[in-house]
């Protein structure tokens, strides 16, 4: 029998700040100050002292930092490696074979999309956008694909499918899983597979049909774009570029094989990827720069960590606040006697309001979408994970599936597919208007949300 929960003033204070955070994000404002004020006031009220409120802020950042540090490191190392590959021209060699496959607009759309998907899984969408944009977009346009169609393919496959699944680096599922109360991202990754397949198939097929319609309606657009293309810069490639172009994909492919055969998950899988990236980076730096590589690798690492910290700095503060909603993490932030505020709300709601799978699925998806409006794919993840944990306490449902649905809603929105201020990188590199790109993505993504939510309700 479920234990009765009594909601205290602390619970209502925490809920007030949750609402403030959501409203701030809905208005495209950074929610960091509301999160800090929430930590301060709840900590002050819980510990009964001003000093207690101040220390709660720091404790929350430490707890969140400890939870996310492994992912921050591996992403930073991957970005550092991508800078070496770009500088040597190895990235060009890796992508050139795929570029040769694009013989017409139909093939170009899917080859460009899947190349973006694979590159984003291993290097994240931000570096992948520059890589794919520089090498493959001109080829795709010459094959007859409109620049807007190329941007749509890159967006949906990279910032949509790849970032919302993140199966290789596992940044997104790790954050969501931690907030949902899982020790590792494995349950969430497993639960997300049918949802990711549904969302990916629906959005890309609908988008492809719309791109084909555009080409038929305006055949002159291709000629205009081709005329506007700049001549691709000839790269001077040396033996190091060829070595890295071969060694890097083989090394990461072997990592994936090792993960599958040795059942490496969570932190172990992250450690394998991070270690591999460091080894390739070190060897590549020495081969490319000789003795100067001892100094040059420092620049790569520094640039990589600057990127990683830039991405995760706000997520740590947001995560620290929402971690007060999870029992054991709340204890680390507030101290002995702390309770998971969101978990308690879940139990209380189940005792007063009749809930069902459809209701909780819609609420979780809407939460991810609303919070994702700030243009950050990762900002919604601590909240949607906490929401899934909350409803998981209230109903006998699969909270991993629920959390995966919220993650899809948050990342597809904030990660850069349907809001103009989030699609700017892809829009810039393909030379299209970000508003046009977001508008073109909207119908496929909304249809995808509807179908994926139906699948999630059935699976829960």
Image (cartoon, rainbow, N blue to C red):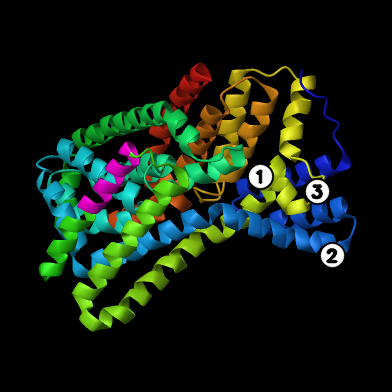
Label 1 element class:
helix
Label 3 element class:
loop
Label 2 to label 3: alpha-carbon separation: 16 Å
Instruction: Name the dominant secondary structure of the magenta segment.
Output: helix
Q: x%, y% of residue 425?
A: 37, 56
Q: Which residues are magenta?
A: 250-261
The answer to whether one can see residue 329 in this image is yes
**What residue sits 56% from the left and 40% below the top?**
183
The residue to which callout 3 is attached is 336
Q: Which one is nearer the viewer's eye here, 375 or 69?
A: 69
Mark positioned earlier in the residue sequence (1 or 2): 1
The residue to which callout 1 is attached is 22
Please give left or right for residue 280 compared with residue 274 in the image. left
Q: x%, y% of residue 75?
A: 42, 57
Please give left or right for residue 348 compared with residue 185 in the image. right
Label 2 element class:
helix
Mark positioned earlier in the residue sequence (3 or 1): 1
Q: Is residue 256 magenta?
A: yes
Q: Which one is nearer the viewer's eye here, 346 or 17?
A: 346
The answer to whether one can see residue 29 in this image is no
């Amino acid at each position: 029998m479920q234990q009765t929960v009594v909601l205290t003033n602390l619970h209502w204070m925490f809920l007030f700040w949750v609402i403030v955070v959501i409203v701030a994000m809905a208005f495209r404002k950074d929610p960091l100050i509301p999160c800090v004020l929430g930590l301060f006031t709840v900590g002050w009220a819980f510990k009964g002292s001003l000093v207690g409120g101040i220390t709660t802020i720091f404790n929350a950042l430490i707890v969140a930092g400890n939870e996310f540090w492994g992912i921050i490191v591996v992403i930073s190392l991957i970005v550092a490696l991508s800078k070496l590959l770009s500088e040597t021209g190895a990235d060009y060699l890796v992508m050139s074979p795929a570029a040769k496959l694009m013989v017409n607009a139909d093939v170009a759309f899917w080859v460009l999309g899947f190349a973006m998907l694979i590159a984003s899984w291993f290097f994240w969408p931000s570096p992948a956008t520059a890589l794919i944009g520089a090498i493959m977009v001109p080829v795709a346009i010459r094959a007859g694909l409109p620049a807007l169609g190329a941007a749509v393919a890159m967006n949906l496959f990279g910032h949509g499918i790849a970032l919302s699944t993140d199966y290789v680096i596992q940044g997104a599922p790790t954050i969501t899983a931690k907030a949902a109360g899982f020790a590792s991202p494995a349950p969430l990754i497993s639960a997300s597979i049918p949802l990711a397949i549904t969302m990916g198939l629906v959005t890309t097929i609908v988008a492809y049909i719309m791109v084909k319609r555009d080409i038929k309606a305006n055949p002159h657009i291709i000629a205009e774009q081709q005329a506007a293309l700049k001549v691709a810069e000839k790269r001077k490639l040396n033996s190091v570029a060829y070595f890295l172009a071969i060694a890097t994909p083989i090394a990461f492919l072997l990592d994936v094989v090792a993960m599958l055969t040795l059942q490496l998950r969570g932190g172990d899988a992250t450690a394998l990827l991070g270690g591999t990236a460091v080894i390739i980076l070190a060897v590549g730096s020495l081969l490319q720069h000789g003795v100067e590589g001892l100094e040059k690798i420092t620049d790569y690492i520094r640039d990589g960590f600057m990127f990683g910290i830039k991405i995760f700095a706000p997520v740590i503060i947001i995560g620290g606040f929402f971690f007060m909603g999870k029992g054991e993490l709340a204890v680390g932030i507030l101290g002995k006697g702390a309770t998971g505020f969101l978990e308690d709300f879940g139990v209380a709601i189940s005792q007063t309001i009749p809930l069902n799978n459809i209701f909780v699925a819609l609420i979780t998806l809407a939460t991810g979408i609303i919070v994702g409006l700030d243009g950050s794919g990762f900002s919604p993840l601590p909240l949607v994970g906490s929401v899934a944990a909350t409803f998981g306490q209230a109903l006998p449902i699969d909270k991993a599936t629920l959390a995966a649905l919220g993650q899809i809603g948050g990342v597809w929105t904030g990660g850069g597919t349907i809001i103009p201020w989030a699609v700017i990188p892809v829009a810039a590199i393909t030379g299209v208007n970000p508003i046009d790109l977001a508008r073109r993505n909207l119908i496929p993504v909304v249809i995808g949300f509807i179908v994926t939510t139906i699948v999630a309700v059935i699976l829960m």
